[in-house]
Image (cartoon, coloured by chain):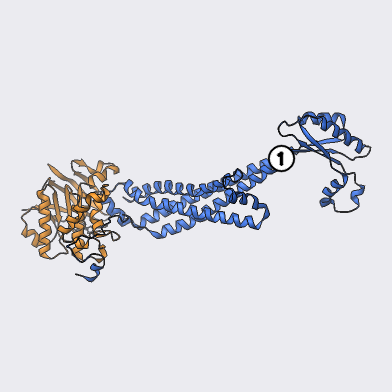
Chain colours: A orange, B blue
Amino acid sequence: MSIVRFENVGLRYGSGPEVLKDLNLTLETGSFSFLTGASGAGKTSLMRMLLLALKPTRGMITLFGENVGALPRSRLPDLRRRIGVVFQEFRLLDHLTTFENVALPLRIRGAKLNDYRDNVMELLDWVGLDHHANAYPPVLSGGEKQRAAIARAVVSSPELLLADEPTGNVDPALALRLMKLFRQLNQFGTTVLIATHDTHLLETFDVPVLQLADGRTEWLP
Amino acid sequence: MRPQAAAGSRPSSATRPALVTGRAKVIPEATAPHMTLMTAMAAMCYLAVLAIGALLMTSAAVNSWTSQVASEVTVQISGADGVDVDGDTARAARILRDTPGISGATVVPAAEARRLLEPWLGKSAILDDLPIPQLINVSIDKASPPDLEGLRARLAAEVPSATLDTHRRWQAELISMAGTLTWLAIAVLSLIASAAAVLVVYATRAAMEANREVLEVLYLAGARDSFISREVLWRFCLTGLKAGLIGALLGFITFILLGFGSGRLAGPVKDFLYDPLGASSTSYLAILAVPVVATVISLITARLSISRVLKAMF
Ligand SMILES: Nc1ncnc2c1ncn2[C@@H]1O[C@H](COP(=O)(O)OP(=O)(O)OP(=O)(O)O)[C@@H](O)[C@H]1O
Ligand SMILES: [Mg+2]
């Protein structure tokens, strides 16, 4: 069973050159993979398409068995709710506390504070941010923001987790801990795709690596 | 620990933060569009209140005039050459008293008639030479009004010098003027309402544009249009209500000031102040509809506008 399928997907921004050309790839449900490639290769663009934030200029994307190009706008939130995402630039909301940021996906789903308070605090504890629960993102360090963004991505137990450079701002020890968190989620059934150009990370973990170069993807041996 | 981080959080991880409220608004309040909207909407609500007030005062005045006029008719005995004014007056008065539905007929003394004409003709001696018509004031029993057309015919047959003035034309003109003013007020009110709606559309766009980044994050986290709508709407609801209340309050203050400044307006305003639920002032409660309508306009327009902006944005 594949959770993601790209067929001849191409993407260009405006009238610029094709950033991604003829992508053909599948991610199996429950898999754990890295996405790598030079800066500007198109990793973030690929993830934005997976998140339904960006429409491919050609080709077909199948997500959770649905042809996303054919879905009406009103069905997109349902699909997005099955995806957790860590943005490369975090995109935490500055006017909300760390706790509120992390709880945001639950609030959007209509959950009640009393039902999720303990879960969110536990998660903050896990990523080492429990004592920053009431702090606002502008006063957090880069690594702390990154951990908050990761906590927000996983709080709703998504079926698919997309993480764009999730270890870019943390020390190696913390990077390993975060990777363990992702592995743990994967063992519970979440399909994980992590974009990174951290070669150390690629060497440490023995997982399939999808290489993006010249607008095309290729599984590295 | 970094010092600035400590400012927004508790230093110890042993105890859980007590202040996890989690209830901050998901979308930050873009203050500028709301302040602009509130000011402009309040001004519009104020204008609406003035229009309604003016309409109510006019219709109250027209009503009281027409009812006074309707209860009185006048018979005139023309003072032309060869007419026995005194004899005709007596005969006409007799006919009037005979007519069922007429409660009284008073002959206006010549001096009184002269006094009525003075404002037009002055106190000059001309008045003595002019054939001044003799007036008879006729009061009508409103419960069983007389057959005025029959009366007119009988007077014409028996006292040719007498004419019956029922003030009908005067009354008709007043009523048609009141109708025109009503339509004018309705036109002004609709114009104000449409202008308010346009303002709300612009304010919605500005508020959402200011929060585009936040909206995108919410979207990508799976928010539906309805969720975002709700988050944005309550603020517009509040702005509309506040603006309406400010406008209505300013309107009342204006009426009170006008009322104290001019004797003519004082009546209805005083009625309202001392007896807000009395018959003559109930209509003033219509002014209280202004904040309600302003809120409804804000709500509906913002709701439609939000959906459109969201569809265009994402
Ligand atoms: N919004 C945009 N408008 C126009 N061009 C864009 C836009 N976003 C990205 N691009 C271009 O698309 C290409 C791929 O960008 P993308 O951000 O996907 O790369 P990346 O692999 O994530 O890079 P990095 O490792 O530096 O994050 C780049 O050449 C970039 O200039
Ligand atoms: Mg990138």
- Crowding near pointer 1: few (<14 within 10 Å), some, many (20+)? some
Q: Which residue: 59% across, 50% down?
A: B274
Residue A199: image quadrant is bottom left
Q: Residue furthest front?
A: B274
Is residue A39 toward the left or the right of residue B198 in the image?
left
B260 relative to A61, above or below: below
The percent coordinates of residue B133 (x first, y second) are 87, 42
The percent coordinates of residue B248 (x first, y second) are 52, 53
B210 relative to B144, above or below: below
**Residue A80 visible:** yes
The N terminus of chain B - image quarter? bottom left
Q: Which residue: 48% across, 47% down?
A: B292
Find ligand 1 in the image and state its quadrant: bottom left
SS assignment at label 1: helix
Question: Which residue is denoted by mark 1 in the rendering?
Answer: B171
Amino acid type, label 1: Gln
Q: Chain of mark 1?
A: B
Is residue B254 toward the left or the right of residue B80 in the image?
left
Q: Residue furthest bottom?
A: B3
Q: How many marks?
A: 1
Is label 1 within 8 A of ligand 1 (CB to nearest ligand atom)? no
The percent coordinates of residue A138 (x first, y second) are 26, 65
Q: Nearer the viewer, residue B244 or B12?
A: B12
Residue A137: image quadrant is bottom left
**Residue A53 visible:** no
Q: Nearer the viewer, residue B97 or B81?
A: B97
